[in-house]
C-alpha cells in the first residue's frame, strides 16, 4: 500500500517512479513527496498566496503527526484540506488524500509495515543494479536505451533475462515478480483497448524455475492472459516448491489448475507424482489371461484331452502410475495436450 501511494504521488508530480526513488521514500518518509504534491496542487488551483496564509497560521492550531514533522508542511496540509480538499471535482484529491493519510500514520507502525520491503529494495538498488533498474532519462552521460516490457512486445523483440537465482534467490525472485507484474499490466492494457488474442501479436513467455518468481500477477496471466495473446510456458521441479512460494498447497493447486497442457518428466516427489497422476485420470484397464492344459489316460489305447481357457477382466486404474513417473529415463515424458 505504501509503495502504491508513493507511485501515484510520483506520477502526479510528473516524476518517473524508479526503484531507487521508492527506496528513498520508504527510508526517509513521504514528507518530501507530499510537499511537492501540495505545491503543485496550490499552483494549479491558482492559490498563489498560500505561503503567506501558511506563515500566518497559529502553530498551536496546526496538528503535527510527530515532533519530527515540519510546521510548514503540516500547515500546508491543513490549508489544503480546508480549501482545495473540499472541492468534489478536484482531480488530484485522491492522490493527495492518500499521501496525507500516509503522512499522518503512526511513524512507528509505518516503519514496521515497510520494514520487510527495505532489505529487498536495498538489494535491488545496490551497485550496478541501481543504474540498470533505476535509469535517469535526463542523464546526458548515459546513452543506454531505456527498455520497457511494452516496447519489447510492440517491437516484436526477444528479451532474455538471466536472474541468477542460485547465488541470490531473493533478488531473483523480486526482479522476476516485478517483470511479471509489468507484463500483466500490459495484458490489462490490451484488454482495455478491446484487443483480443486473435488480432494482436502473440507473446510467448517462458519461465524457468517458476517457484522462484511466481506471484499473483503471473497467476492472473495463466488465468486470463491467453485472451490478450500471452501464452505462458512454465517449468518447475515439484508441487512442494510452488506451495512453499505461494504459502499453501491449496494456492499451488489453484495456480497449476490454470495450465491447459502438462508435460511430466521423471519425478521422485510423491506429492508431484499424485498431482500428475490425477491430471491423466483413470481408465478401464483390461487384463487378458490364457491357459492350455492336456491330459491322457494310462491305457494301451489312451484318450487324450485338451482344453484352452481365456479370461478377460477389467478394472478402473490410474492411466499413469506414480511408480512409472519415478522410473522414467532421461528425455522421456508423459504429456497431456489440449
Image (cartoon, rainbow, N blue to C red):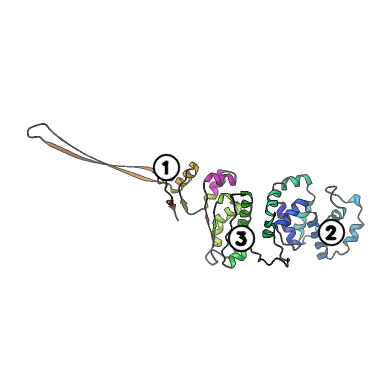
Query: What quarter of the picture does the C terminus occupy?
Result: bottom left
Asked whether 68 falls inside the magenta stretch, the response is no
What's the distance in space between the residues labelled 3 and 1, CA to CA?
43 Å
**Number of other residues with Cα within 10 Å of mark 1, as a class: few under 14, some 14 to 19, many 20 or more:** few
- Going from N to C along the chain, the mark reached first, 3 or 1, is 3
> Residue 323's mark?
1
| Residue at the image position 13 percent from the left and 37 percent from the top | 304
- Going from N to C along the chain, the mark reached first, 2 or 1, is 2
Q: SS for tag 2?
A: loop
Q: Which quadrant of the view contains residue 76?
A: bottom right
Q: Position of residue 315 (x, y in %)?
A: 36, 42
Which residue in the structure is indicated by mark 3? 188
> Residue 83's mark?
2
Tell me, yes or no, whether the two marked residues, 3 and 2, touch with CB atoms within 8 Å: no
Q: Position of residue 152 (x, y in %)?
A: 60, 65
| Residue at the image position 79 percent from the left and 47 percent from the top | 107
Q: Foreground mark, 3 or 2?
A: 3
Q: SS for tag 1?
A: helix
Tell me, yes or no, whether the two marked residues, 2 and 1, touch with CB atoms within 8 Å: no
Residue segment shown in magenta? 230-254
Q: Position of residue 26 (x, y in %)?
A: 74, 52
Q: For residue 86, say whether it is visible.
A: no
Amino acid at each position: 500500500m505504501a509503495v502504491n501511494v508513493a507511485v501515484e504521488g510520483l506520477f502526479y508530480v510528473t516524476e518517473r517512479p524508479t526503484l531507487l526513488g521508492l527506496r528513498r521514500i520508504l527510508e526517509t518518509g513521504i514528507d518530501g513527496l507530499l510537499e511537492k504534491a501540495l505545491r503543485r496542487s496550490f499552483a494549479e488551483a491558482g492559490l498563489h498566496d498560500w505561503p503567506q496564509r501558511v506563515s500566518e497560521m497559529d502553530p498551536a492550531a496546526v496538528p503535527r503527526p510527530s515532533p519530527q514533522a515540519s510546521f510548514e508542511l503540516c500547515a500546508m496540509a491543513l490549508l489544503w484540506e480546508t480549501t482545495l480538499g473540499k472541492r468534489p471535482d478536484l482531480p488530484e484529491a485522491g492522490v493527495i488524500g492518500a499521501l496525507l493519510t500516509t503522512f499522518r500514520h503512526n511513524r512507528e507502525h509505518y516503519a514496521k509495515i515497510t520494514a520487510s520491503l527495505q532489505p529487498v529494495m536495498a538489494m535491488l538498488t545496490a551497485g550496478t543494479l541501481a543504474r540498470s533498474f533505476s535509469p535517469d532519462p535526463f542523464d546526458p552521460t548515459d546513452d543506454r536505451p531505456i527498455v520497457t516490457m511494452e516496447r519489447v512486445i510492440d517491437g516484436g523483440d526477444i528479451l532474455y533475462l538471466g536472474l541468477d537465482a542460485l547465488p541470490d534467490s531473493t533478488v531473483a525472485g523480486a526482479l522476476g515478480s516485478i517483470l511479471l507484474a509489468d507484463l500483466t499490466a500490459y495484458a490489462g492494457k490490451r484488454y482495455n483497448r478491446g484487443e483480443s488474442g486473435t488480432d494482436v501479436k502473440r507473446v510467448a513467455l517462458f519461465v524457468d524455475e517458476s517457484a522462484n518468481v511466481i506471484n499473483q500477477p503471473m497467476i492472473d496471466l495463466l488465468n486470463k492472459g491467453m485472451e490478450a495473446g500471452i501464452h505462458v510456458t512454465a517449468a518447475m521441479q515439484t508441487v512442494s516448491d510452488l506451495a512453499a512460494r505461494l504459502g499453501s498447497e491449496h494456492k499451488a493447486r489453484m495456480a497449476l489448475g490454470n495450465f491447459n497442457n502438462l508435460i511430466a518428466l521423471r519425478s521422485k516427489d510423491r506429492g508431484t507424482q499424485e498431482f500428475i497422476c490425477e491430471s491423466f485420470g483413470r481408465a478401464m484397464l483390461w487384463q487378458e489371461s490364457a491357459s492350455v492344459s492336456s491330459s491322457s489316460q494310462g491305457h494301451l489305447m489312451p484318450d487324450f484331452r485338451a482344453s484352452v481357457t481365456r479370461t478377460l477382466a477389467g478394472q478402473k486404474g490410474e492411466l499413469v502410475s506414480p511408480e512409472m513417473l519415478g522410473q522414467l529415463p532421461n528425455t522421456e515424458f508423459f504429456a497431456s495436450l489440449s
